[in-house]
Image (cartoon, grey):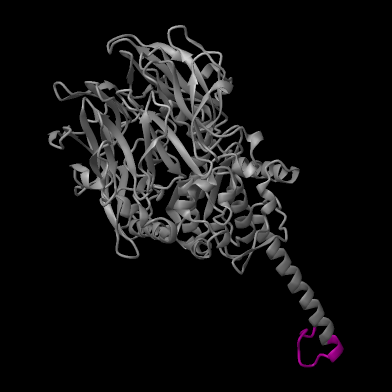
Amino acid sequence: MTRPIFSAGCHKGQRLIYYAIFAFLTILLLHCSQGDKQAAKYDYPPARRADVVDNYHGTQVADPYRWLEDPNSEETQKWVKAQNELFHEFVNTPVRKKIKKRLTELWDYPKYGSPCKAGGRYFFWKNDGLQNQDVLYMIESLPDKPVVVLDPNKMSEDGTVSVELKDFSTDGKYFVYAVKVSGSDEEVLKIRDIDSGTDLDESIEFTKFSAVGWKHDNSGFFYDRYPDPKTVPAEDVNKFNRVYFHKLGTPQSEDELIFEMPSDKDLGFAPRVSDDGQYLILNVWHGTDNENRIYYRPVGDEGEFTRLLDEADASYQFVNNIGTDFYFNTDLDAPLNRVVKIDIKNPARDNWIDIIPEQENAIESVNMIDKKLVVVYLEDAHDMLKIFDLDGKLTAEPELPTIGSMHSLKGKRDHREMFFKFSSFLYPAYVYRYDFEDSELSIFRKSEVDFDPEDYTTRQVFATSKDGTRIPLFITHKKSMMPEGTNPVLLYGYGGFNNNMTPYFSTQRIIWLENGGIYAQASLRGGREYGEEWHRAGMLENKQNVFDDFIACAEWLIENNYTNSSRLAIEGGSNGGLLVAACMVQRPDLFGAVLCRVPVIDMLRYHMFTVGHFWTGEYGNAEENPEHFDFMYAYSPLHNIEKGETYPATLITTADADDRVVPMHGKKFAAALQYADSGENPILLRVDTKAGHGHGKPTSKRIEEYADIYAFLFEALNIEPVYLEEAAEGLSNGPK
């Protein structure tokens, strides 16, 4: 008979041996248990934690992943390669193949841009369906067969060279366009002779976000550019903006300097020639600040510019002019905007005339076409169209097809027609033509997608934010869907930089809707849906309001039985990437998955890279201003990750050629989350190659990217895909 090991009759020495054996077995079991737990987690590539600490106004802030700011180091590249391998291993499933097949089917439909008219001819962009880049076409009259003018697809085999149309000469014989490589914001301006189909010999370098305005004698054009990077310190590459005049047929080295202001190297100058050809207007801007200035001088004059509006006290958007009467869309003393007329012979503010006073809805844009004022208003985050005469009398109110968004509105002061694109969550962009003579709105080009919108519905609701503010929220889903508290929901937001989140069509979103997903889009503070006060309520020290708004929308969806936290995904890109990152760090319990795309993450150092200094008016500068540091440090996603917290499944995307929001943000965020997270949800990083912030990305890359994104979402939220074996039946016949 064996004696119990721990009986009271054991000798002291025996008990010590037994205790030692028990302790060893316990440690072994714990080790095995922990090993199993670690094995269940993802084998993240190790990221070295360096001893880097900065002093911000007396506060010590660690930055252990500073080394990831160098994209060219061997250590960074090795780490990124391993992260990409881990991500692609996660999404490389049969479901992804089905998603990509369906995305390719959905994307394969003709897409059109709004025509612009120059020299009596019409020019518009078109994509046959799966072309990597849109192609520019020309027609002599509306019924004519289009002729190719410029095909960017011939500029690179993989479609990573894109172009942006800048401006046409008034006789319609030439146009200036920008060439961009791999999604970079850097441009090279080219000049095309339309009839010969060839480019002139000269090129314009050192441009970025450039504006172009042709002289009406068609001898050349005004443009703005930055200095040759070799001539300035690295920190000034995107500063010291200047305006030049380029004469056709001459090299850039002979371009005439028109305007500069070296005393303020942060200012930019966007030139525009008035529609009557009489005035050169300079929009003087400071980063993304709402406040700007307006300078002008007669086109043929070589004297000083008149500083018409030089206080930077409001937004002033030059609409157009009739003689010396200049029309402006401004928010001065009008947060919802108004249209004023300034006689430049008597420009004192006492002489300004209100043409269209501030109304109950915010003005989104104003154009002068057919010597009338075409005004797009925002009503609860969707567009409405009104037309006024130059005295401010309402002359027409064309009815738009449904609740949706207008964009790419084209037309000039003396044109008798205008074109614009219109779309909604369920209907792809149609191009409409408005005839001012008979006040008739008609379809110029329509699109048909392999998708039946009649099976779906959109409704608008309002969530209540933490401080009681009413937040618009659009919800789109199948008509047959019943809220059961377990539906997968994708909530999208942005909230910043005056960017309005209105209804728009997204081809890739159909994948989500077809598979039973609910799409929700929030119109948060920081945009301009309700005017400048709405914007200011979501910037600088008020930025936390934006996160509170988004969290309130998420909670509304849960409280109203649409979903639960395990089935709720959030998505945002760029400033929206900051949004979802801040929200997941503040409320990791609220979300099941996070799509954090090309995000701004490190709020203490963002301004030190490429064009980040443009955004200090929106975000602040933690390095220079102690008060800014306090509120930025409080929400900066990188600096509020908690060791030991369990974070939702997260996909962070960025790109190697993104020179707007540099990829160090996404890399540092991924490294910090992977180190701190104690749960078993995937924290993954996808770094695209030969790609930038998003503009100009070829169709093939877009399809691959969204196949990855939805494969991640389906896996993270445990969605069983349906309707992927066969394409959904029916074609979209467009808005009724």
Q: Nearer the viewer, residue 317 or 690?
A: 317
Q: Nearer the viewer, residue 355 or 151?
A: 355
Q: Is residue 3 magenta?
A: yes
Quarter of the rendering containing residue 393 = top left
Image position of 703 (left or right of 548): right
Image position of 73 (left or right of 529): right
Q: Is residue 478 magenta?
A: no
Q: Which residues are magenta?
A: 1-14
Question: Which residue lies most toward the top here?
Answer: 196
Magenta part, dominant SS: loop
In the displayed structure, 725 sits above or below 233; it is above
Question: Which residue lies most toward the right here?
Answer: 13
In this view of the protein, can residue 479 be seen by the observer?
no
Question: Which residue lies most toward the bottom here?
Answer: 9
Q: Tell me where residue 199 appears, x and y as whole percent.
A: 51, 13
Which residue shows up at 28% across the image and 13% down it? 142
Q: How many marks?
A: 0
Q: Nearer the viewer, residue 80 or 313?
A: 313
Image position of 407 (left or right of 269): left
In this view of the protein, can residue 128 be seen by the observer?
yes
Q: Tell me where residue 649 appears, x and y as whole percent.
A: 53, 53
Q: Tell me where residue 423 appears, x and y as whole percent.
A: 30, 33
In the displayed structure, 601 sits above or below 205; it is below
Quarter of the rendering containing residue 57 = bottom right
In the rendered image, which quarter contains the N terminus? bottom right
Which residue shows up at 30% across the image and 13% down it? 120
In the rendered image, which quarter contains the C terminus? top left
Q: Tell me where residue 551 appears, x and y as whole percent.
A: 40, 59
Q: Nearer the viewer, residue 27 or 633?
A: 633
